[in-house]
Structures are given as structure tokens and as C-alpha cells.
Amino acid sequence: MRSALYTRFVAGLAFPLHEYIKGHNTAAVRKAMEESQWWSVDQLRGLQTQRLRSLLMHADANVAYYRRLFRERGFVPANLTELSNLERLPLLTKDLIQTNSEDIKASNARGLIRFNTGGSSGQPLVFFISKERISHDVAGKWRATRWWGVDIGDPEIVVWGSPIELGAQDHVRALRDRLLRSHLLPAFHMSERMLDCFIDAICTKRPKMLFGYPSALGLIARHAQRRCQPMDQLGIRVAFVTAERLYGEQRDLIKRTFGCQVANGYGGRDSGFVAHECPHGSMHITAEDIIVEIVDSAGRTLPPGTEGEIVVTHLATRAFPFIRYRTGDVGTLDPGCCSCGRGLPSLREIQGRTTDFVVACDGTVMHGLALIYVIRDLPGIEAFKIIQETKLHVRVLVVETEKYSPKVEAAICGGIRARLGQQVLVEVEHVEDIPREQSGKFRYVVSNVAL
């Protein structure tokens, strides 16, 4: 009872106050979303059309890149009457954002925050977000969390590896996490000893929910089974997984080991909080904020039920618009309705988004992002791919630019050896192009070492 009262205090007062102090209207947005999720399909499409028209009119008035684009295309945002009118606009790519970054910023934007993608699936992207977008993304995630009978303030274990999060563990962040009862476990280094510590932390904290990479939670689950450590009586209700493709065997392993349901999520720092699984099994799109299109290789919109690339328009990005943004992921829109009764459309069969673990010489298992971060910000590298052939042999494919130098190559080799072991042979191979996977997704890390 005391724990439930504390959760109500955090979710009803402390967290909304925290967001308000930061200039976010997250609580109000979430409350509105909890009403609109029950609207009919037609009502939601009407809301999307209204918000899309408003976004495009704002872009026409305040964003130089889109003002030029609309003039070139003879496109008048005020005349938009239905979502299919979007097809008259070209797709937005990472390269276009990088090339036109300053012109994509709205002239009246204030307080923009620089963000970048994690770099696990293609060229890392630098972009900017506003408090409006943060509020809406957090609200969408918050709403989906509540679908599973848990809320902000319930004890939570987060298994994550982004340096953006891990580097923010200052006193203020630590205090906030204590208030929210959220405990972070770093997914970079997962040796036998660290896995033991993770299992002990989960048993001690007895969280209501887990959050992390499916591969990381799966690794912890397998280790718990090897230790014959029971984890299914801790009161964990749900494991939220994201950032990678969730495979059926991972879902079964996590569900069986922790005695909880598994809720898949899809999105990214660039595309936003796109979709989340409900207890009835549908991956509901956050339709109040996000329009999802499925397109073919020529950029033509495909009907529901047909596989193609996922393209996203984020309606809460007036300060730095994401309009028809190519995610590089492959998926399908579900043509049916969910038995849960929500009018929100759904995605199905999401492919891509997979990042391997790598294994150090001493047996330490770490997330592939640990190697990605060694290379992604070095100068003179247009693209790269890391292939771990054995514990003692790593190949790095590099597409170089004119800024590449011997110092960069030394940094690559030194950084990888610092993480995997000084005895590792690191071979840098200079290539003209690095082919993508069959799905169209780019994989930065491939490990051929069995865990």
C-alpha cells in the first residue's frame, strides 16, 4: 500500500512538477492522449490532418528549407485536405538533414537542444529538438507505460548503454532517478561478474518493470538460468524492450525467466516514439504525433499490409521539422483493428534495428555500441563497419574522406584494443563502399563470436 501511494505521488505530482520546471507540458499532453486513444480511426485521421496542415504552414512561414521546397513543388500547405497530400513532397534523408541543418531550423525556434542518433543503424545523424517535441515524446512513452498497469514512480531497472544517459549521472540526475525509483545498469560491459551484479540488483530492487535492449535483457536472463537463480517471483510485471529487433526466442526467454510480459517498442532519437505494443499484442502508433507511411524503393506510398521502408512525419517538430523522414527500417502497416478497442493504427513485422554484442579477450561481453562510440565521431570517416571474426581478430571497414590520417587509424585500433584487449589484432581495411543488409538496414557491428 505504501509503495502504491508513493507511485501515485510521483506520477500525479512530483514528475509533472519536474516536467513543468523544465518547461515541458508533458502531463497535459499525456492526459489528452489518454482520451484520444479511444477515438475512432476517422477522428484520429482528422486530428492528424489538422495538425499536419498546421505544421506545414508553420514550416512555410518559418523554415527556409521547406519554404524553398514548397515553392519548387508548387505546394500550398493551406490547401492540404487529406494525409495523402503528403505524397507530393520528397522524402527527407539523413544526408539532407546534415547538408541543410541550419536551414531546417525554424527562424523563431528558441532553446533547441542538439541531439544525435546512437549510430547503430547507418550514418550517425546530428539534429535539434525543442521542448515541444520532448514533451510529446515523453508523454507518448508515459501513456504506453500505463497500458501495462505500471506507472512512473514504480520501481524500475533500466539496462542501457547510451553515453548520453550514462554521462548524465550527475547529482541532479541521480537525485531524480532516486525520486522516480529508476535504477540504471550499464549495458556496455556485461562480464560474468557484472551479470552477477545485475542479477543481484534486480533481486534486491524487486522492480515492477524492466527497460532495455532485448539482447541485454536476454543475456541477463540466460545468465540467471545458468546460475539456477529464480527471477520469476520478484513481482516484475513487464519488460519494455526497444532499440533492436525483438526476436521470438528473446521474448520467450525474457518472459519465462522474469515471469512477466514483454512489451516491444519502436522508435529512435531521430524519428521519435513511434509505436508501442499494447497488452493485446498490437504495435500501436502514437498517431496524435506521428504519421507513418510505408514506401517502396522509389519512394511511392504502399497500402497497409505491404512491406516497405518506414517513413515518419513527426507533428511536434515545428522547431526542426521531420517531414517524411526515411528511417531506413522495413515494416508493414497493419490493415486491421486491435481488439483492445483503441483507434490507434498499428505497425507489424518491423525489421532491422539489431546491434550485436562483442566479446573481449577476457570473456567480457559488451554491447556493440561500445565499439561504435570509439569510431563514430573521428574525423575523416564517411562510413565504417566493425566485424569481430574471433576474440583476437577484428576487421574494420572504412570509407575515408580527405580528412583521414594515420592518427585516426591509430585511434581506431587503440580504442578497440582498449575495450577488447591489447592483444587483439585490429585490421583496418579501406573500401569504396560498405553494402547494406538485405533488409536495407546498415549494421555497424557484426560479431561472429558465440556468447
Image (tube, rainbow, N blue to C red):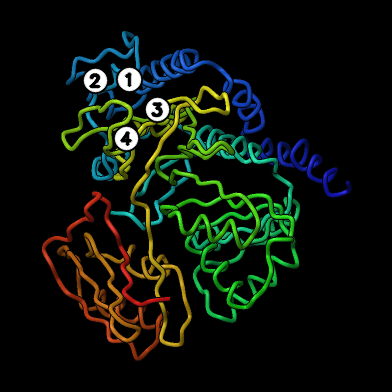
Marks 4 and 1: CB-CB under 8 Å?
no
Using the image as rendered, state which of residue 99 and residue 343 is in the foreground: 343
- The kind of secondary structure element at disc 1 is helix
Marks 1 and 2: CB-CB under 8 Å?
yes
Mark positioned earlier in the residue sequence (2 or 4): 2
Using the image as rendered, state which of residue 356 and residue 411 is in the foreground: 356
- The kind of secondary structure element at disc 3 is strand
Q: Which mark is residue 60?
A: 1
- The kind of secondary structure element at disc 2 is helix
The percent position of residue 395, horizontal first and vertical second, equals 24, 76
The three-letter amino acid code for the residue at tag 4 is Val
Q: Is residue 272 left or right of residue 104?
A: right
Graded by Cα atoms within 10 Å as few (under 14), some (14 to 19) or many (20 or more), the crowding at tag 2 reads some
* Extreme residue in the right direction: 2
Mark positioned earlier in the residue sequence (1 or 2): 1
The percent position of residue 450, horizontal first and vertical second, equals 38, 76
The percent position of residue 268, horizontal first and vertical second, equals 43, 46
Q: Mark 3 or mark 2, which is nearer to you? A: 3
3D distance between C-alphas at marks 3 and 2: 19 Å
3D distance between C-alphas at marks 4 and 1: 21 Å
The three-letter amino acid code for the residue at tag 3 is Ile
Q: Is residue 350 left or right of residue 122?
A: right
Q: Is residue 168 above or below residue 341?
A: below
3D distance between C-alphas at marks 2 and 4: 19 Å
Q: Which mark is residue 70?
A: 2
Residue at the disc numbered 3 = 291
Marks 3 and 1: CB-CB under 8 Å?
no
- Can you tell which quarter of the image residue 118 is in? bottom left
